[in-house]
Image (tube, helix red, strand yellow):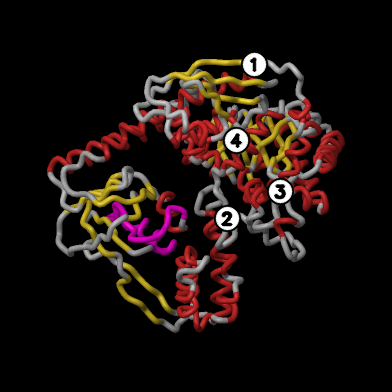
Amino acid sequence: MNIFKKLFSSSNPPIQTTTLTVTSSNGFHLRPIAEFANEAKRFDSEITILAKDQEVTATQVPKILTLALEQEECFTLKAIGKDAEEAIKHLSSFFAQLMQEDIAVEVLEHESDSYEADTITGTPISKGIAVGVLTDFLACHTTHHQEDALSLQQAREQTARDLEMLYTQNQQKAEAKIFLAQKALLESELFQHNFANIDTEIKQLEGTMFHSRIADYRDLKKRIESYMGITITYQLPHEDVDTIIIADELLPSEVDELSKMPAVKGVILRQGSTTSHASILLRSFKIPSMIAHEKITSSGEYYHSILDASSGQFIDAPTDADYEKAEAKTEVYQLQEAKSHQRRFDPTQTTQGLTIKVLANITDTTSAREAKEQGADGVGLLRTEFLFTDTQPTLEEQTEAYTEIFTLFEAITIRTLDIGGDKSLPYIEIAKEDNPFLGVRGIRFSLQEQTLFREQLLAVGLAAAKVANRQIKIMFPMVATPEEFTQAKTLALDIYQAHNIDTTPIQFGIMLEVPSVLFALDTFDQLVDFYSIGTNDLTQYLFAIERTHPTLTANPTSPILMNALAYVRRHTHKPVSICGELAGLEEATEQLVTMGYDTLSVSAKLIPSLKAKIRNI
């Protein structure tokens, strides 16, 4: 593929124009301008804005700001180039959405200021309303016991096994990466050779680039010490009273403890970030929470306060009207959730009538049945490596499991064994590598160890033959070159021919997660039946940041990643879906749909709310 075709455009490119009107009372200000300019970069055409006797480039934010466009003012949008018609049509729709969103923000901000009593503001972590007694979160007591206590080395090894198990059990959830990151920290010098001085070492991390991971170090220390005979327990002063917890910060394991306490209705942190591992868990457990902008202390008195984590407000001494407002907002949230759940089986269409398929990421028959109950339109990703985590399955066991899942849905995308990097199975030996994320993983492993690969392909084929009227998509992971795909598909077809398996209902595609594929889409388009974009791995390879790295993280909605996704959507003619974590992020949904992605695959629990979100786009 020649990415630079736009350099050789016609000498007389087509010109398209349209007139747009600013409808927001805020005018065309910085936030929507930045989004609009970024969206305009998706197109090859030269796009400009004409207003007030000026013509400025639509991709340059400072230039657009100089126009100072206010409510009810109009401007002309012009595009010159081969995709001018597409650009004008798309950007006109995108601009209208920006204006509508800006109006919605105005309404939200107006509502959020309507509490009568004094409020303390904060940054929301997990949306929702909580009413309860403000209570400090303190360790109740520490217990030392020598019976069954392990040595430091044994405790480290057991902790590593625990984290591996937690990762496997929560693969579909946002918190899965937390356990992998913590497991990686166990290999650090601090835990391997300097554990006796760990408190001093952790203290020295304050104010450094590793400060954001102090909670993870403390959490690991707590996990290890629990196996060495030191146990810390927590207890609320009033276990039968609704409580809002206040704490400087929380460890991931402490959030887990809080999630098991029915009395805990909300959490306020005095410090931290919305991207910390504790914050991820608070969202996962749907505990209303925020990070306070001002100091909040518990008076120790027995009265109920309000935490409005949706708007980022804490009302210490609410009026009766404030209580009524909190109750009303809670009822609205509950009604929205109930409505989403009630409509989970309905077709999902945008306000423009575009149908979007919402599929499920699953790991086994249990999660498949859950996905069916949550309203999944099909399976967008069956992670086969998690079907059998303890022992190597037989051909019959694989066939039976696949058949059971295939009977539940009309369309299933099944990913062949994807191990290596951060994924391992106890019955498969992989040689130690200096950088396993760039080593033998995914399709590379399968093509090297063909005994396992052949058996799995045969099991999929046999299962497909047992069900009728099903579309079975076989997806190969970590494909970097057309040759890898061709080799894998040829192997599958040879197996099916040898066993007289009808391949009519079977399609072959790739998990698009290696950036090299972006530069060979023309070739891949001639070979594959479909693509599914794994945004988790694609992000780590685009930014050269290991996705389980304990201290480095990449922005999951980075414009760079979004530009890559837009590029794929524009330059391929085969079906493309999104099955990575990005598909489940509410802030990314509209952008993905606007790009043209009509198939999103997420964990089962997100399906009803994602469908509801799409219906409002």
Residue 239 placement (x, y as % from top left): 24, 61
Residue 67 placement (x, y as % from top left): 46, 28
Q: Residue furthest front?
A: 53
State which quadrant residue 194 falls in: bottom right
Q: CA distance from mark 4 to mark 2?
A: 19 Å
CB of mark 2 within 8 Å of CB of mark 3?
A: no
CB of mark 1 within 8 Å of CB of mark 4?
A: no
Sequence-wise first label, 1 or 3: 1
Q: Which residue is mark 3?
A: 417
Q: Residues within 10 Å of mark 3 (few under 14, many from 20)?
A: many
What amino acid type should be assigned to the residue bearing mark 2? Thr
Which span of residues is magenta-colored? 250-275
Q: CA distance from mark 2 to mark 3?
A: 14 Å
Residue 17 placement (x, y as % from top left): 57, 16
Q: Nearer the viewer, mark 1 or mark 3?
A: 1
Q: Which residue is mark 1?
A: 15
Q: Quadrant of the N terminus?
A: top right
